[in-house]
Amino acid sequence: MDNFDNYNASDKAEASELQRMIAIEQQKAQFQAQVHTFTDVCWDKCVDSPGSKLDYRTETCLQSCVERFIDTTLAITNRFTQMVQKGAH
């Protein structure tokens, strides 16, 4: 898909811009999927019975759960990046 040899400069610029926009939209979709996942996990873990307002325990549990989920995701991502970089050398 990156082979634009048969295109003129304008077409190449448009194709590159389109690829950039697609990559951005894919990142947005991945982010939204992550949010959906930790919402489901943390909701099931922390919310006993939904009401009109979150109590202190539920709010604290949700906050901690999301923070742990983000920390874990970052740790896994960083480790994966290190493995890829070591493999590239």
Image: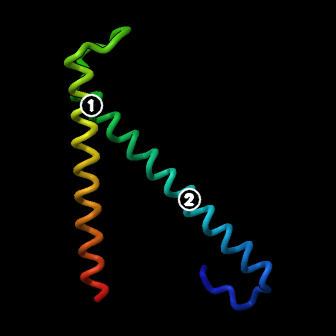
Tell me the element at label 1: helix
User: Which image quarter holds the C terminus?
Assistant: bottom left
Task: Name the residue at the top extreme.
Answer: 52
The amino acid on which the numbered mark 1 sits, given as a three-letter code, is Gln
Name the image quarter holding residue 80: bottom left
Q: Is 81 positioned to the left or the right of 35 in the image?
A: left
Quadrant of image for the N terminus = bottom right
Residue 39: x, y in percent?
35, 34
Q: Give the SS element for disc 2.
A: helix
Q: Residue at x 35, y 11 (%)?
A: 53
How many marks the image carries: the answer is: 2
Q: Which residue is mark 1?
A: 63
Residue drawn at x 27%, y 64% as measured from the top left: 78
Query: Where's residue 59, x and y in %?
Result: 27, 22
Asked if the residue at tag 1 contacts the one at tag 2, i.e. Cβ–Cβ closer than 8 Å, the answer is: no
39 in relation to 68, above or below? above
Eyeballing the image, is 80 above or below 37? below
Say whether residue 19 is left or right of residue 74. right
Say which residue label 2 marks.
Answer: 24
- Local packing at callout 1 (Cα closer than 10 Å; few below 14, some 14-19, many 20+) is some
Question: Which circle's residue, 2 or 1, is located before the other in the chain?
Answer: 2
Residue type pointed to by label 2: Ile
Q: Percent from the top left, x then y, of residue 77?
A: 29, 61
Which residue is at 70% across, 91% downward? 5
Q: CA distance from mark 2 to mark 1?
A: 28 Å
Residue at point 34%, 9% (across, down): 51
Q: Is residue 26 above or below residue 32?
A: below
Quarter holding residue 3: bottom right
